[in-house]
Image (cartoon, rainbow, N blue to C red):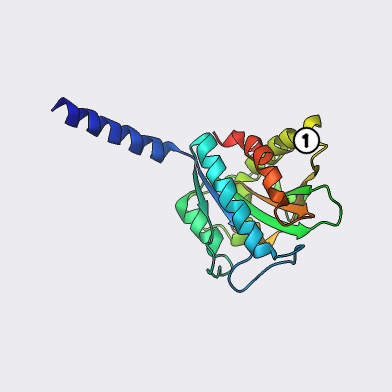
Amino acid sequence: MKMIIFILIFICNFILIQINASIVMINPAGHAKDSGRRLMEGVERAQTFNFAEKLQQELQNEYSLKVILTRYPGEEIIAWESASFANRLGIDFYLSLHLYREEELKPKIFLYQLVYDPMSDFCSRNFDPYVFIPVWQAHFKNIHQTRFYGKYIKDKLTIESYSKNFDFYGLYGLPLKPLCGIVAPALLLEIGIHRDEQWQSLIGPLVESFSFLV
């Protein structure tokens, strides 16, 4: 009897941990009908998925997060589908991953958030939960939290010990289609690599920079 009670308590605690865990969604650029940009040997679609899958594993291991990918190999992602999924799920953070071919040997990391007009987008607003928010205004609700996360990542990735391994640029605000319609804090990482597998050296620093998710 005691063993049954112990098992039930363990199961309940496990469920509570899972419920309380932050939910992160990673969007690897490209899909079944969009191979993305050419890299040194392969294409963006394949490497962003490998990148996202490895980042997913490391984030879950390091911080006990629930990390979801927006696609799997062979899937076609329709415009706005990822945003709709993210909003219905009520995620805590959204990250869009993009790769391009960099001629220089040293990788480059660019960080962006969705901003149409810096003067109006960052204005204070009151949101009525019963009023429909247009797609192009969805990012308003958490825009300040997004900027805070972006600055946190910037602070982590611009420490002197990392400057020898990669160059960091940002945080920039641009009207980015991959982030449009997402209510949760959402950032876009664009990474320039000289070799297709070079992104592997960036996993450790990136995982450390996402410690705000705990």
Between residues 18 and 121, which one lies in front from this camera angle? 18
Q: Residue furthest top?
A: 2
Residue type, mark 1 in image? Tyr
Give the secondary structure at mark 1: helix
Seen in the image, is 190 located left or right of residue 137?
right
| x and y, in percent, of residue 194 in the image | 80, 55
Binning the other alpha carbons within 10 Å of mark 1 as few (below 14), some (14 to 19) or many (20 upward) gives some
The residue shown at (76%, 47%) is: 109
Seen in the image, is 64 located left or right of residue 16?
right
| x and y, in percent, of residue 162 in the image | 78, 35
| x and y, in percent, of residue 169 in the image | 81, 45
Quadrant of the rendering where the C terminus is positioned: top right
Q: Is residue 188 above or below residue 74?
A: above
Q: Is residue 31 above or below residue 158?
A: below
Residue 183 seen: no
The residue shown at (65%, 45%) is: 143
The residue shown at (26%, 30%) is: 9
Kindly identify which residue carries mark 1.
162
